[in-house]
Every structure is written in structure tokens, then in C-alpha cells.
């Protein structure tokens, strides 16, 4: 057994009854001290489903990221439960162990306790209410308690979802939705506001060479999604000009295939985003032929009853997670990425959902915001679910291919799938508080589809409070923003200082 600071913990007889056992501190222990690293014993999903869940071990296992169940050895299974724990734990998938760290200063002989969750299989000392059985759920891993907060008792009263009954495919009027959607102002509708980037282009005098050049672009790895909003060819009079690559992608001039007798490539300005309005299309096309995508203008898409109920349940999950965080001594800030809504249903699939909360208090780490924790958890899950393999293209460019959701390339037959290598493409994130500027930028980089938040942060928010990052000039992704209606009595007691970066 690997043990850290073993002298801090008193030894005791491991065969004694759990009701009388405690794990006491042998001396004072400062906050943020690593006191135990417990190795784990794994059960496969099949083993656990057939045997493990029917034994006493079911009460002491953790759900690993890859679906295996882990039994903590060492002190890991001996820490008692507390509603106000003084020890937090984190699942370390790299070393396949569980690390236990103090969240505050510990006095000599004080019992060291962790938080098991709200759904307990026993009656905590000093309580008289009957408690529910512990469900299968993801254990907290130090990035913000990624447990599936499902059927636990609600910490605050919630209205029943008004969208639960009825035809799930019925379209709900905008004013009856549980949130108000932010309508961005028209953008890039005057010449000075057009955002551009520098790009390499080459004139192709002979039209018969166009096909060869397009094939060369694919083989050279230059046909990438960052120019997908532009047409590849511009024709002026009898001259065709081919768009090659941005200067960011190719700082030096690309070298077209020899034998075509082409003039040297040169640099010109091209629009950095598609045209969202007819006025913008006309202006951008003066730089380079641009695609018109009016659906991205921020026009409100219709929501069905089933979608509205899905959103209601997702926000409820988020608020419950925030209450969980507060019971652990954290700030009551939580984030939740719900599994995509499936047409014709009213349920939320927990196996594809990720929930986390702010852990800056227990970790003493300034970056452990709820949004960042969830994004990090999704990245860890994606990494553990795929096995990247390095491949070499005919031009010596190293790319990565995997069996997971990462972007793949395979020569001339397939092109990169736009957005496949981002964590939050087509997903919605629910948060208790408006994300700060740092978290909003993380959402941009992760290509989130939309964000729905509960409480405004007018002094620090990055989605309409202090600023609105998705609408700023130079930002290469736009996501939808919605504010949960305040009269629905969600999270009224989740107040934090309005100067805090949530």
C-alpha cells in the first residue's frame, strides 16, 4: 500500500465494526495536505453487473471513467461519511489510485471524514429520516464532483416541470420557454467592421489546371475547415484565383506543383467568418467570395415541449449539484453538460452527461471553476475512451487518428470533419451562475452550442455581464446565450459575491 504522511493517521484494527471505527488524526494536519494514496482493485463492467453489485462491496466502489468499478484499498474504504467532510478525494486515472487531501486544518485526534453523497445506504448518526439506497453513480474525482445527481432528495423546493406532460413534439411559444434567449446585434454590416485574415492565393490562368490544383490542396493537407466559409475559387474576367491557406496555417508561401507554369502565390485579405446577413454578404464578397449562412444569425430556433422539459431537468440537476458543493464546503456554483436531447422523448440520459462544481476552496487552485472542471472532465473522458495513433501523410505531416471522437484524416478519401475534434460541439451547458470571462473563452474554444445560466453576474460575467465574449470582434465562434427566468424559483439561495469570477 502506498501511503503519504502515514504518521498523521492513527493505526487501528481494520477488522473492527464500522459503526465504532474512526480514522483519527495523530497530530495537527494543515489544509491541502495529501494524507493517503489508496490503490484500487478493479472489477470489469460485466463482473460488477453479474456479481459485485450483489455483495457488500457494492457500497464501497467507485465508478471509473472507462466504466469499470474500483474498490479502494488502504484507508480508502475506511473513512466515515460526514455532511461536512474535512477530507476530499480524487480519482487518479493515470496511476489508478485514489488520493485523499485535507480541505481544512485538522486538529489532533479529529476524525477524518469524506462525503459519500446524498443517497446513502445507511442512516447517518443523529438523523431519523429514512434514506434511499445508493444508486450507481460517478464518484467525485477532484474536478468538481461528477456524480450523476439524479434521484436524490431536492435540497430546495422545485416546481414540477410544466412541460412534462403533453406531446413532446409540440412547439412551445418563445414567451413560454423557461429562459430568455439573448439576441445578438447585427454584425459586420459596414465595411470597417468586416473581420479579415491574411491568406495565400495564386492565379490560375489555365482553367484546365483548376482540378489538378484542388487535388493538390487535399494531398498537401491545406483543405482544412478554417476556410470552409469561403469559396475556393474567385473568378474575375478570364482569370481564376485559388485560395490556398491562411498565413497562420502556412507562414511561408506554399509551393504549387511544378509543371503548371503558375505565377508565384501572393497574400490577400479574406473574411474570417461567413456572412450572416445579405448586407454582410455583399460587403464580404468584395474581399473574397463568401458563403451565406443566415441560420447562424442568432435567429431563435423552435423549441418543443420535450426539449423544454429536458432543459428543466438539466437545470434542476445543476442546482442540486450546487447544493452538493456547498455541503462539501465549496462555493455553490455548478455546471452541467446534458446529453443531447433525443426527439420524441422527455428524459435525460445520465450516461452521456457531465456535472461538476467549483472546487477552488478545497483545492486552493484559482482555476478550478465549475465550467473548467466540467470541460476538463469531458477531455479526460474522451482521452480514456480512445487510443490515439500517430500517422504520417504522404507529405510528412503528422496527424492523429483514434477510435474515439477525435478528428480523423485518411488520405484523399476523407476530409477532416469540422468540429469533431472539439469537446462541446452541438452540446448545451447549464450553469448556476453566468460564466466568467475565462470560462466563457473556454466555452468558445470548446465550441459549445449554447449556454443557459441561472444567476447573472453583472460585474464579472463573460456572457453579457461585464462583457459578451461571443460577440467580440476577432472571436472565431459564436454560441447561444440564455438566462433562466427568475420567477421560476430556481436556486434563489445560491448567492455569491457579485465581484466573484464564477
Image (cartoon, rainbow, N blue to C red):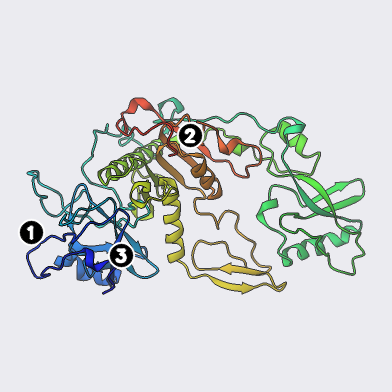
- Asked if the residue at tag 3 contacts the one at tag 1, i.e. Cβ–Cβ closer than 8 Å, the answer is no
Reply above or below: 252 against 277: below
Q: Residue 98: which disc?
A: 3
Lower position in the chain sequence, tag 1 or tag 3: 1
- Residue 362's spot in the image, x, y percent? 33, 50
Is residue 249 toward the left or the right of residue 416 in the image?
right
Callout 2: helix, strand or loop?
Answer: loop
- Residue 222's spot in the image, x, y percent? 72, 61
Reply above or below: 400 against 173: below
- Residue 412's spot in the image, x, y percent? 69, 68
- Residue 49's spot in the image, x, y percent? 24, 67
Residue at figure coordinates x 30%, y 57% from the top left: 138
- Which of the 4 image quarters holds residue 327? top left
Which one is nearer the viewer's eye here, 442 or 404? Answer: 442
Q: Residues within 10 Å of mark 1 (few under 14, many from 20)?
A: few
Q: Residue 19: which disc?
A: 1
* Residue identifier under label 2: 460
Q: CA distance from mark 1 to mark 3?
A: 23 Å
Which one is nearer the viewer's eye here, 477 or 228? Answer: 477
Q: CA distance from mark 2 to mark 3?
A: 35 Å
Callout 1: helix, strand or loop?
Answer: loop
Is residue 110 toward the left or the right of residue 195 in the image?
left
Is residue 265 toward the left or the right of residue 185 in the image?
right
Lower position in the chain sequence, tag 2 or tag 3: 3
Lower position in the chain sequence, tag 2 or tag 1: 1
Residue at figure coordinates x 44%, y 33% from the top left: 499
Is residue 199 toward the left or the right of residue 148 in the image?
right
Q: CA distance from mark 2 to mark 1?
A: 47 Å
Reply above or below: 19 against 152: below
Is residue 341 among the parts visible in the rendering? no
Amino acid at each position: 500500500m502506498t501511503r503519504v504522511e502515514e504518521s498523521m493517521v492513527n493505526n487501528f484494527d481494520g477488522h473492527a465494526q464500522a459503526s465504532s471505527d474512526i480514522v483519527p488524526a495523530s497530530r495537527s494536519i494543515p489544509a491541502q495536505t495529501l494524507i493517503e494514496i489508496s490503490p484500487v482493485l478493479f472489477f470489469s463492467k460485466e463482473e460488477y453487473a453479474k456479481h459485485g453489485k450483489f455483495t457488500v462491496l457494492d457500497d464501497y466502489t467507485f465508478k471509473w471513467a472507462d466504466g469499470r468499478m474500483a474498490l479502494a484499498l488502504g484507508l480508502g474504504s475506511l473513512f466515515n461519511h460526514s455532511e461536512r467532510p474535512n477530507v476530499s478525494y480524487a480519482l487518479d486515472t493515470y496511476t489508478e489510485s485514489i488520493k485523499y487531501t485535507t480541505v481544512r486544518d485538522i486538529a489532533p485526534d479529529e476524525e477524518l471524514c469524506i462525503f459519500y453523497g446524498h443517497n446513502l445506504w445507511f442512516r447517518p448518526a443523529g438523523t431519523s429520516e429514512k434514506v434511499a439506497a445508493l444508486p450507481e453513480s460517478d464518484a467525485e474525482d477532484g474536478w468538481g464532483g461528477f456524480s450523476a445527481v439524479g434521484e436524490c432528495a431536492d435540497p430546495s423546493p422545485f416546481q414540477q416541470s410544466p412541460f412534462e406532460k403533453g406531446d413532446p413534439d409540440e412547439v412551445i411559444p418563445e414567451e413560454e420557454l423557461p429562459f430568455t434567449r439573448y439576441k445578438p446585434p447585427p454584425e459586420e454590416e459596414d465595411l470597417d467592421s468586416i473581420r479579415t485574415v491574411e491568406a495565400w492565393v495564386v492565379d490560375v490562368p489555365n482553367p484546365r489546371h483548376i482540378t489538378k490544383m484542388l487535388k493538390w490542396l487535399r494531398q498537401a493537407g491545406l483543405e482544412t475547415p478554417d476556410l470552409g466559409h469561403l469559396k475556393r475559387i474567385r473568378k474575375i474576367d478570364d482569370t481564376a484565383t485559388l485560395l490556398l491557406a491562411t498565413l497562420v496555417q502556412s507562414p511561408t508561401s506554399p509551393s504549387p506543383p511544378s509543371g503548371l507554369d503558375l505565377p508565384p502565390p501572393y497574400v490577400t485579405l479574406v473574411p474570417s467568418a461567413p456572412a450572416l446577413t445579405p448586407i454582410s454578404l455583399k460587403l464580404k464578397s468584395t474581399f473574397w467570395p463568401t458563403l451565406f449562412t443566415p441560420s447562424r444569425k442568432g435567429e431563435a430556433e423552435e423549441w418543443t415541449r420535450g426539449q423544454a422539459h429536458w432543459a428543466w431537468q438539466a437545470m434542476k440537476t445543476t442546482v442540486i449539484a450546487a447544493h452538493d458543493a456547498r455541503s462539501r464546503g465549496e462555493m455553490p456554483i455548478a455546471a452541467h453538460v446534458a446529453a443531447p436531447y433525443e426527439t420524441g422523448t422527455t428524459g435525460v440520459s445520465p450516461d452521456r452527461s457531465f456535472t461538476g462544481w467549483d472546487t477552488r476552496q478545497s483545492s486552493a487552485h484559482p482555476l478550478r471553476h465549475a465550467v473548467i472542471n466540467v470541460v476538463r472532465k469531458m477531455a479526460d473522458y474522451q482521452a480514456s475512451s480512445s487510443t490515439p495513433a500517430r500517422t504520417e501523410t504522404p507529405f510528412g505531416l503528422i496527424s492523429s487518428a483514434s477510435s474515439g471522437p477525435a478528428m480523423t484524416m485518411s488520405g484523399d478519401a476523407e476530409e477532416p470533419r469540422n468540429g469533431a475534434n472539439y469537446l462541446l460541439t452541438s452540446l448545451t451547458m447549464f450553469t448556476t451562475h453566468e460564466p466568467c470571462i475565462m470560462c466563457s473563452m473556454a466555452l468558445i474554444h470548446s465550441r459549445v452550442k449554447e449556454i443557459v445560466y441561472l444567476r447573472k453576474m453583472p460585474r464579472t460575467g463573460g456572457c453579457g455581464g461585464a462583457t459578451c465574449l461571443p460577440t467580440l470582434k476577432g472571436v472565431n465562434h459564436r454560441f447561444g446565450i440564455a438566462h433562466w427566468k427568475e420567477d421560476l424559483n430556481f436556486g434563489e439561495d445560491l448567492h455569491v459575491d457579485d465581484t466573484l469570477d464564477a
